[in-house]
Amino acid sequence: MKLKLLSITLLLTLAACKSHAPDASGPGTAIDPPIRPNPRLAAATGFDFYLLNLSWSPEYCHSHPEAAECASHSTFVLHGLWPQNKDGSYPQNCGNGPGSQTGPDASRFSDIYPEPGLLEHEWRTHGTCSGLSANDFFSAARSAYQSVKIPSQLTNLSSQTSLSPEQIAALFTQATPGLSRESIAISCGHNYLTAVAICLNKSLHPIACPAVRSCRANSVRIAPPR
């Protein structure tokens, strides 16, 4: 994605968005989103499912403390809700999507995107492929994000620890009823945790991930919030 960005912080943040597949090296009942999804979600066409990417903020903030997200010392933050296909491909930059000319109202979504430039990027690159208006798309992204409970073992982390990808996934399935191991992909870089991704259907309920690679490291180092 060759975008001319206004700040180096945003440029570095977007680098993680170049590939939807997590680095291969190195949520009984489905989850009910706390905000009722727009009914047009399920009717969206042009892709098969969504990938909800939750970035592990401490890893990014370790080298980019000036980033807007780092001021709150968060753990997992919303990177994006990305339309995906079962064959591993994904649509991008569908500029003729509903509302693509006006874009999202950044003030409505500052809770999930404190950096307006990232919000605009996520809309242009991914949201325009959803079949939704900009504000509907980010309302859906917020709903999906809030439906996943972050494990207390990670929110209360005070020092660096190491866990296997299976152990990290297990923490999420224990914290969020209805979330299965098959719905989760762990992303790592240089054996450090960088993100957790969750595969969702078009109604924002978890599904088994098709064609989404996960971290292959035996043990992943997890940096604490700063």
Image (spheres, rainbow, N blue to C red):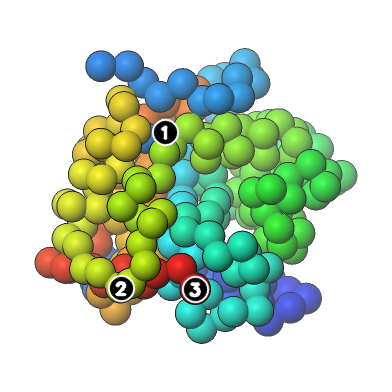
Task: Please name the residue that numbered disc 2 is placed on.
Answer: 160
| x 35%, y 46%: residue | 151
Relative to residue 224, is residue 192 drawn left or right? left
Residue 76 percent coordinates (x, y):
47, 55
Relative to residue 43, is residue 96 drawn left or right? right
Q: Nearer the viewer, residue 153 or 97?
A: 153
Task: Please name the residue that numbered disc 1 is placed on.
Answer: 200
The amino acid type found where label 2 is placed reads Gln
Relative to residue 212, is residue 108 drawn left or right? right
From this viewpoint, which residue is outermost toward the right?
102
Residue 226's tag is 3
| Mark in front: 1 vs 2 | 2
Q: Circle 1 sits in a helix, a strand or a loop, which is it? A: strand
Q: Circle 3 sits in a helix, a strand or a loop, which is it? A: loop
Q: Is residue 31 above or below residue 101?
A: above
Q: Check disc 2: other Cα within 10 Å, few if <14, some if 14-19, many if 20+.
A: few
* CA separation in Å, label 1 and label 3: 31 Å
Query: Circles 1 and 2: CB distance less than 8 Å?
Result: no
The amino acid type found where label 3 is placed reads Arg
Relative to residue 153, is residue 44 drawn left or right? right
Quarter of the image that includes the N terminus: bottom right
| Mark in front: 1 vs 3 | 3
Residue 12 percent coordinates (x, y):
58, 77
Q: Which of 71 and 133 is in front in this view?
A: 71
Q: Can residue 93 be seen in this view?
A: no
| x 41%, y 39%: residue | 149
Q: Is residue 47 above or below residue 212?
A: above
The amino acid type found where label 1 is placed reads Leu
Q: Circle 2 sits in a helix, a strand or a loop, which is it? A: loop
Which mark is first along the chain, 2 or 1?
2
